């Protein structure tokens, strides 16, 4: 008899397994339908011996010291600040858009103050900023929106930015200085030995048993457990009874080249032609020295594993129905990006799992005392 069955060995499931086992002495069975732990953050050495991320580039960044300290129990860190270039009109330009992006794209020599005015002259006033189009055109105008955002977003999401919630493109700021870092967070690092190694350390506890290539549906009636934590898609858990929640997928094309370097930074975005959105070269992230280099091309798709919840009003409304059902389902906790239908980064999922643990402690211990 297990105290907990945890479905999904990504950040959400693994953090909770670790907390429940180490802080409460609970017995945990952690399952995943994939053949590995780590969820979408899983990394591995490919045939050439290069460390790659199986599900696309994962860069850790957070402003929370608590989350950083928590993960630091299981890994050392390699300082790394992420920089991204976008191929626009045959040039590689910094994205987020900054002073250098504009000066190089238009052959100008503006200062930061002048760029502020330059944006203001082009920005289209939008009274109520609701969509991913509104966010960008109201800040930098339509031309830059079309060059940097419209094509990328249509490829990535399969819908026009005017049909996506503002939170999607609002992830990417606009700057008038020369800061070319992708993230502004206080803590920006890569796990020194990789993500999978970090997960192995997190889950190395006698009270945690792991079963891979195991689907919840196969074992839900076979295994005895007291309580359940589900980190897969919430609509799947409830048999799609209110209809399917769309999750956007990607096909990852991994290649290794017989040369030392392919591109000047870890990620190059392709907002214009091409049927992929971005290309990642891992050695920039990992610091690995190697005479060859491995890359991943991301091709967005509707088919395949669920990776991204799609932030749109009708999906939020459907998620609310599932969420209401979840709240009425005793002894089951829904945690993580797929189960709570939130476009969360890794640190946010860790934060969500740590607060779920505190809630569980209150509820379960409270019930035991009654
Ligand atoms: P997941 O990692 O998806 O784990 C859920 C697990 O549950 C999966 O392994 C799945 O196989 C398993 N599962 C689901 N249903 C079942 C079932 N019925 N039975 C058994 N197992 C099941 N975040 C960042 O902070 N920085 C980044 O740079 C970054 N880059 C990203 C790039 C891409 C391409 C993607 C897709 C995401 C990126 N993220 C990034 C987000 C990050 O991947 C997520 O925040 C995090 O991995 C979510 O963890 P999770 O545990 O909620 O879900
Ligand atoms: N985006 C864009 N052009 C870019 C980079 C981002 O249009 O060059 C938009 C696009 O809609 C994307 C969103 O901003 O999905 C968020 O970008 P981010 O890099 O955060 O995406 P993620 O790493 O989560 O895939």
Image: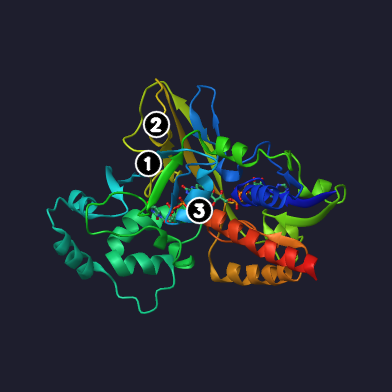
Mark 2 surroundings within 10 Å by alpha-carbon count, few (fewer than 14), some (14 through 19), many (20 or more): few
Mark with earlier residue (1, 2):
1
Residue carrying label 3: 67
Q: Residue at x 38, y 69 (%)?
A: 134
Check residue 287 in the rendering and tell me which mark sits there, or answer none.
Answer: 2
Residue 317 placement, left or right of 1: left
Mark 1 or 3: the one toward you: 3
Check residue 80 in the rendering and tell me which mark sits there, or answer none.
Answer: 1
Where residue 364 appears, as percent x and y from the top left, is 74, 63
> Circle 3 — which element?
helix
Q: Which residue is farthest bottom? A: 127
> Circle 1 — which element?
loop
Mark with earlier residue (3, 2):
3
Check residue 319 in the rendering and tell me which mark sits there, or answer none.
Answer: none
| Quadrant assignment for the C terminus | bottom right
Mark 3 surroundings within 10 Å by alpha-carbon count, few (fewer than 14), some (14 through 19), many (20 or more): some
Question: Which residue is nearer to you in this view: 127 or 358?
Answer: 358
Q: CA distance from mark 1 to mark 2?
A: 9 Å
Where residue 353 appears, as percent x and y from the top left, is 61, 56
- In which quarter of the view is residue 110 placed? bottom left
Q: Residue at x 49, y 30 (%)?
A: 51
Q: Are marks 1 and 2 in contact (CB under 8 Å)?
A: yes
């Amino acid at each position: 008899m297990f105290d907990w069955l945890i479905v999904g060995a990504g950040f959400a499931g693994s953090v909770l397994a670790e907390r429940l086992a180490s802080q409460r002495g609970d017995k945990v069975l952690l399952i995943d339908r994939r053949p590995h732990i780590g969820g979408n953050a899983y990394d591995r050495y490919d045939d050439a011996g290069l460390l790659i991320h199986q599900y696309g580039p994962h860069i850790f960044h957070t402003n929370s010291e608590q989350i950083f300290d928590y993960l630091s129990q299981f890994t050392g860190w390699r300082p790394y600040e992420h920089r991204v270039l976008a191929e626009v009109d045959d040039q590689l330009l910094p994205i987020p858009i900054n002073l250098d992006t504009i000066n190089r794209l238009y052959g100008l020599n503006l200062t930061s103050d002048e760029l502020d005015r330059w944006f203001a002259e082009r920005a289209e006033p939008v009274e109520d900023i609701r969509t991913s189009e509104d966010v960008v055109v109201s800040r930098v105008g339509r031309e830059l929106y079309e060059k940097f955002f419209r094509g990328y977003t249509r490829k990535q999401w399969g819908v026009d930015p005017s049909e996506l919630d503002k939170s999607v493109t609002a992830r990417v700021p606009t700057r008038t200085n020369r800061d070319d870092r992708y993230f502004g967070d206080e803590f920006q690092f890569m796990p020194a030995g990789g993500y999978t190694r970090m997960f192995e350390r997190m889950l190395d506890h006698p009270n945690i048993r792991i079963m891979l290539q195991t689907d919840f549906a196969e074992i839900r009636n076979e295994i005895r457990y007291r309580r359940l934590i589900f980190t897969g898609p919430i609509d799947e858990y409830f048999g799609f009874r209110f209809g399917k929640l769309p999750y956007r997928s990607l096909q990852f094309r991994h290649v290794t080249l017989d040369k030392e370097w392919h591109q000047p930074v870890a990620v190059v975005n392709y907002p214009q032609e091409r049927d992929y959105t971005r290309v990642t070269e891992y050695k920039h992230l990992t610091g690995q020295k190697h005479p060859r280099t491995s890359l991943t091309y991301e091709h967005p798709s509707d088919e395949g594993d669920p990776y991204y919840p799609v932030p749109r009003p009708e999906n939020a409304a459907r998620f609310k129905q599932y969420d209401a059902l979840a709240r009425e389902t005793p002894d089951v906790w829904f945690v993580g990006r797929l189960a709570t239908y939130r476009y969360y980064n890794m640190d946010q999922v860790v934060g969500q799992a740590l607060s779920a643990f505190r809630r569980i402690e209150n509820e379960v211990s409270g019930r035991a005392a009654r």
